[in-house]
Every structure is written in structure tokens, then in C-alpha cells.
Image (tube, rainbow, N blue to C red):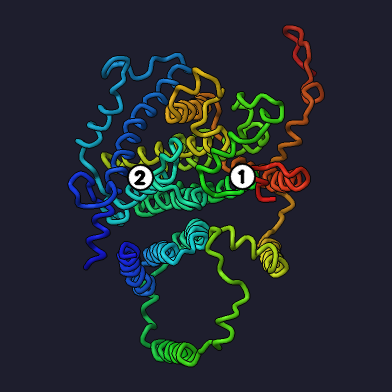
Amino acid sequence: MEFIVSALDYLLGIPFLGWGENVGFIYKGLLLLVALLIFIAFILLADRKIWAAVQMRRGPNVVGPLGLFQSFADLLKFVFKEPTIPASSDKFLFLLAPFITVMLALAAWAVIPLDYGLALADINVGILYILAISSLSVYGIIIGGWASNSKYPFLSALRSAAQMVSYEVSIGFVIVTVLLLVGSLNLTDIVIAQSEMGLAYMLGVPWMNFLNWFWLPLFPMFVIFFISLLAETNRPPFDLPEAESELVAGFMVEYGSTPYMMYMLGEYVSIVLMCALTVILFMGGWAAPLEIAPFTWVPGMVWFILKVGMVFFMVSIVKAFVPRYRYDQLMRLGWKVFLPISIFMIFVVALVLQLTGWGWNGGLA
Amino acid sequence: MTLTLFFFYLFSAVLIPSAVMVVASRNPVHSVLFLILAFFNAAGLFLIAGAEFLAMVLVIVYVGAVAVLFLFVVMMLDIDFAKMRKGILQYMPIGAFIGIILFLELVLVAGSWIMLPEIASSSAMPIDNSISNTKALGQVLYTRYVFLFQGAGIILLIAMIGAIVLTLHHKPNVKRQDIADQVARDPKKAVEVVKVKSGEGLQ
């Protein structure tokens, strides 16, 4: 029974009570979770505000000053509504699906480094872990669509299964090019590598850190990654699984109340996760854009959050002004455009690295 | 160490019942979902064994891609359970017979398999604990076993091409969208602007 005690200590240990050696893992996790959820609440509001601003509306502006508490009001509204479960649905799976979506979206955050050494689990295969978790997120949609036992959700589940599996391939290849440069699967290493080599060093101005980041040498991959991110998270213009003009709301038709809210939450958490991943892979993570006095005073986490906000702004503005793709166009883009380009770029990057010996500590070459 | 023991029992305790449920569950969709759960816990066991790369690849490839396609197919099957269970007694003896033979073979193989002590001591690739699991695998795969690795890749590629060739029917009379063609169109050639006099119309 000793191992159960030690497991409990690892998860719940509190140092000042003298019970365990390290702060319990659950407390760190809870802190991250609460911070993340509050951030998501304001990101959701920002999304609606940006969308409204493009359409010259005001957006939510009633609850709190400037509508700042709108998301919390929505939360209460969802929670107090009555959940309806279709009689002919597979009840267990029907309720399990939103949980899967939220849990997977949150689980991936465990390895994201918010600042140097500020990751819940700084594992060696961080990027593979994120790929693994995000490849699972399709199950939330498929299970929900199937368990609803209804036509539109089912169609939507089939669509999303094909869509998410296809775009994962190009995301994987984009990540491979970054890994070639870095030579490590660890997310902290990827961020550090971006500040220790690059164009700014070659030009002799190492303080212009933003020129070092991978968005510049890998610009085509950055664009592909950004577009694949939209498809992977079912954001407009690729929101075919929930296309409201044809499928009403896709896999969420039969959902209401708290389960519906969990779907929405999971969706936004994974969008922010993909934004964070863009920042880590291409935009230098927590590093300041200029390595000079006023910029280096700002803590790394603030830079990280600012950058995530910037990428989210791009994601949000795309929703406002790009019309929805047709399904065959979506498939064409993924398989016939992005896949060949990203495979070609892997060869180009590998060749350049082999010939020049660039790359962090020699990269993988 | 004790913590890993805890997780070992946790993963195993979920893995074995879910593996049983893959076979035992009545609904094929539930079977696939239990299969996914089994894969997931197997990945956890890999992690405990220190094979982090295998664990992640198991989840990415099997759970993230292969099982999705399984689920995709199984969900679209229209299965009549009553019809499926009709002949079950008729086929039971032969199924049990095959099962018993397979089980006996497994027992024989597992029971009589021994490793020569010389082989164990001089294994081809000694494990180097100083580098990470992923790096070690890559270094072996792309140097010593590069031809075998590439050969396996080519076999898979040929299988994929074969599957596409067998299933692709190119219908000649279907209108297809050619994006490059559309983008390359010249508005001057595509549209003719005509000035029409009032009350006369075009001829």
C-alpha cells in the first residue's frame, strides 16, 4: 500500500504541512486551469467584439463595463438551463462526448511552457504529446455526432472526421521542418533555439530578436500552419462540421445547456492552444521581440500572452471576412496544395541544413 | 518507483477489461471505442516502460488516424443484430475449435521459447541511457537499418498506390472544377460588353 500513499503525496502533497516533499501536482494543475479558463472567458468576449467591430456593430456591451462580464453571464445562463437528452440517443456517449472534448483540449496545456521552466510537465517529447492529444480531439465530435442519433449531427461527424485527419497531416509536416532546425522535441528547447540563432545573428544585430524567430526563415510553413490551425479547430472559413446554413449547428444540434457549453469551451481552449503552439513554434515563445532595456523588463509570460493574443486576433479577424469553403475545396487545399508544399519544404530545409550546417547545435543534420 | 507501480496497475486495470469489452460488447461502435481506450492505456504502459516515442506514435497513428477510420466505417454500417445472432449456435463449434488451436499454439510458443544466454549478453544495439529514447531510435533507424526502414516505407507506398488504383474510377462525363483554369481566365475574353440602343435589343 506504500505506493498508493506516495502517489497521493505526489498529487496532493503540501510542503508546509510537512507531509510531502514537493507541492502537489494537482494544485499546480488547478492554478493553470483556473487561469486558463478566465483567459478563455475574455478571449471569447474579444472574439465577439472583434467580429462585431468588423461588421460595425458594438458587440456585447451590457453586462459589466464594456460588456466585460458577458462570458460569465453566459456561463450562468448555460448552467441554469435544463439539459435535454434525445430519447433515442446513446445516453452515456451523448454526455461523454463534450467531456472528452474539454478534457483533451485542457490536457494538451500540460506541456505548454508559459515562461522559461514554467511548464506543468516539461517532457522530452512535448511536441509529439501535443500532436497525440490534438489528434484525439476528433473523437469528441465523432462520438457526439453519432450518439445524437440524428441526421445532421451524423453528417457533421463524418465531415469533421475527414477534415481533421487531413489537416493533421500537413500540421505534422510543418512541425517536422521546425524540428529539423531545432533538433529536439522539447517545447522549451524549441523556444530557446529561436533566440540563439537566426537572421539577427547573421546581420550582426543580435538584439533584434524578432528577426531570429522561425516565422522568417520558415515563412511558407508559418502560413500553412496558420491556415491548417483554422481547419484543425473547425474555425471559419473551415467550420464545415458546424456550418449553420446547411447543417444547422452540425454535431451540436441536439446539445443544449451545460453539455453545449462544454463543447464551446473545448473549442475555444483548443483554438487558444493552437495559437500558443504557433507562438512557440514560430514566434519565439516567451522571448521579448527586442533584447534591449524596456522590453527585457517585461516578464516572459506577459510576452507569451501578448503574442497568443496577437495570433488569436488574426484567427478572429479571418472569421469576420473570409467566406466559408465548400467541402471539396477544403479537401483539395489540404491534400493537393498543403501536403505537397510541406513535403517539398522538408526536403529543402533538410538540404539547406546539410549544406550549411545551420540549425541549433547543428540541428538534426 | 512506487508511483510508476501505481500507474502501472491503473493502466492495466483499465486496459484488460476494455480489451475484453472490444470482443464482448454488443454494439460495434462501442467495440471500436473500447479498442481506442485499450490503445490509449497501452500507450500509458509504454510510457512507464520508458518508450516515450512508441507511446506517442501509438496514440498519433493508431488512435488518431487508424481508429478514426475504423469508427468511420463502423458507424456507417447498417447492422441488423437479430440477423447476426441467428446463426451463432451453428458457427459456435467451429469458432471455438479455431480459437482453441490458436490458444494452444500461443501457449506452446510462449512456453518453449528460450533465449540463448550468448545472444542476451551480446545484443546488437546496447541501450544507451545518456540520450533520449526518440534520438536513440532515430540514430539506429536511419543509420544501421536505413535500407530496411526505407524498404518498409516503399512497400507501404506501393500498397497505398494499389488501393487507390483499385478504387479510383474516373468517370469521363463528370464536370470538375479546375481552380487553375478558373484563376487563369481573362475577363476580356470571357465577357463581351455590348452597347445596346434603347428599344432595339440584341439580334
Q: Which residue is mark 2?
A: A102
Mark 2 and mark 1 residues within 8 Å of each other at the beta carbon: no
- Residue at 52% x, 37% y is A280
Q: Quadrant of the N terminus of chain A?
A: bottom left
Find residue A316 and report its horizontal and vertical position in percent.
48, 27
Quarter of the image where one finds residue B75:
bottom left
Q: Badge 2, how many Cα within 10 Å: few under 14, some, many 20+?
A: many
The kind of secondary structure element at disc 1 is: helix
- Residue at 43% x, 19% y is A52
Nearer to the camera, B89 or A363: A363
Nearer to the camera, B34 or B152: B152
Q: Which mark is residue A364?
A: none
Q: Residue furthest left?
A: A17
Q: Which mark is residue A182?
A: 1
Instruction: Report whether A126 appears left or right of A13.
Output: right
B78 shown above or below A191: below
Three-letter amino acid code of the residue under disc 1: Val
Looking at the image, is mark 2 or mark 1 nearer the viewer? 1
The kind of secondary structure element at disc 2 is: helix
